[in-house]
Image (cartoon, rainbow, N blue to C red):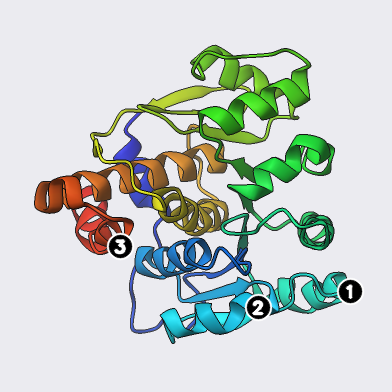
């Protein structure tokens, strides 16, 4: 399969006739008192990949901090609100996809909001990406996204092990493999899983592919947020393209975002070596995107 050709086919062309929002209005659900960087990384990455508007839904004590990072972001301090379901019902019709988890935290009130967000988003048929603390939430609530084929989960090794045990009842200590990733995706009802690691293993329970694009040996805290933000955009683009491609839109979106994130890491590491940070990787999104997809 020519992944580059398939990915290019879903990217909306730039045009003077397009209007604001047409290339994507992406929502990031995350951000708490102690974790404000993660939702920023995801939201700003989504903008730099090419969406038009990036919304962050966070707790009130995180909102002012996140706003201070960039005026580009639209921040909604509603996580933890007793009216979260009604608030999200107002917002979701204007969004094209959601990323749930960056900096979310694990407070009881936060997870109550998470449940309301998932329920509302699934009812709207919104493409979803689950990362970080949202994956922890799914350990005990994976039935909420079972058989929802617009969902993408992005576990690292530890997160994969927990989720695998929760869903299958079997313990696993080895690194994720093509067999275990495909099996877990199938058991979850054919949602798409991106098992992050030395190579990213992607499966929707039917097909399984491996992204081995060269990356960086420096593991930066936050690069998973870059991936999730990019996934939010590509998950929408792949869904709206409605083309006859040789795999599920979620699998194509996952490959696109994984390749891009790895290329960002590779380019940043060439410049900064051991000092590479996630902000350096985000600074390479334009170059990585252009070198891969134009």
- In which image quadrant can residue 167 be found? top right
User: Mark 3 highlights which residue?
Assistant: 279
- Number of the label disc, if any, that sits on residue 61: 2
Q: Is residue 77 toward the left or the right of residue 231 in the image? A: right
Residue 219, image x and y in percent? Answer: 32, 41
- Dot 1 or dot 3: first in sequence order is 1
As rendered, which of 194 and 15 lies closer to the eye?
194
- Dot 2 or dot 1: first in sequence order is 2
What crowding class fits label 2: few (fewer than 14 Cα within 10 Å), some (14-19), or many (20 or more)?
some
In percent of the image, x 52 and y 13: which residue is there?
174
The quadrant of the rendering that contains the N terminus is top left
Mark 1 → mark 3, Cα distance in angstroms: 35 Å
Q: Are marks 1 and 3 in contact (CB under 8 Å)?
A: no
Mark 2 → mark 1, Cα distance in angstroms: 16 Å
Of tags 2 and 3, the one toward the viewer is 2
Residue 124, image x and y in percent? Answer: 78, 61
Residue 130, image x and y in percent? Answer: 62, 48
- Dot 2 or dot 3: first in sequence order is 2
Mark 2 → mark 3, Cα distance in angstroms: 23 Å
């Amino acid at each position: 399969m020519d992944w580059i050709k398939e990915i290019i086919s879903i990217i909306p062309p730039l045009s003077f006739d397009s209007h604001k929002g047409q290339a994507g209005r992406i929502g990031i659900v995350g951000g708490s008192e102690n974790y404000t960087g993660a939702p920023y990384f995801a939201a700003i990455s989504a903008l730099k990949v090419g969406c038009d508007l990036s919304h962050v839904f966070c707790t009130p004590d995180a909102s002012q901090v996140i706003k201070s990072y960039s005026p580009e972001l639209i921040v909604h301090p509603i996580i933890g609100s007793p009216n979260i379901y009604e608030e999200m019902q107002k917002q979701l019709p204007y969004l094209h996809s959601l990323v749930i988890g960056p900096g979310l935290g694990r407070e009881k009130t936060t997870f109550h909001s998470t449940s309301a967000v998932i329920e509302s988003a699934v009812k709207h048929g919104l493409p979803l990406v689950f990362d970080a603390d949202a994956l922890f939430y799914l350990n005990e609530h994976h039935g909420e996204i079972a058989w929802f084929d617009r969902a993408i989960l992005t576990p690292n090794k530890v997160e994969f092990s927990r989720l695998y045990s929760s869903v299958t009842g079997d313990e696993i200590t080895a690194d994720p493999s093509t067999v275990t990733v495909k099996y877990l995706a199938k058991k979850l009802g054919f949602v798409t899983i991106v098992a992050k690691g030395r190579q990213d293993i992607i499966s929707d329970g039917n097909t399984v592919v491996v992204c081995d694009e060269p990356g960086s040996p420096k593991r930066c805290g936050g690069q998973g947020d870059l991936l999730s933000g990019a996934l939010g955009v590509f998950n929408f683009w792949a869904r709206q393209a409605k083309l006859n491609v040789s795999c599920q839109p979620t699998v194509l979106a996952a490959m696109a975002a994984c390749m891009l994130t790895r290329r960002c890491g590779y380019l940043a590491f060439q410049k900064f070596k051991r000092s590479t940070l996630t902000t350096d990787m985000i600074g390479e999104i334009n170059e990585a995107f252009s070198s891969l997809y134009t």
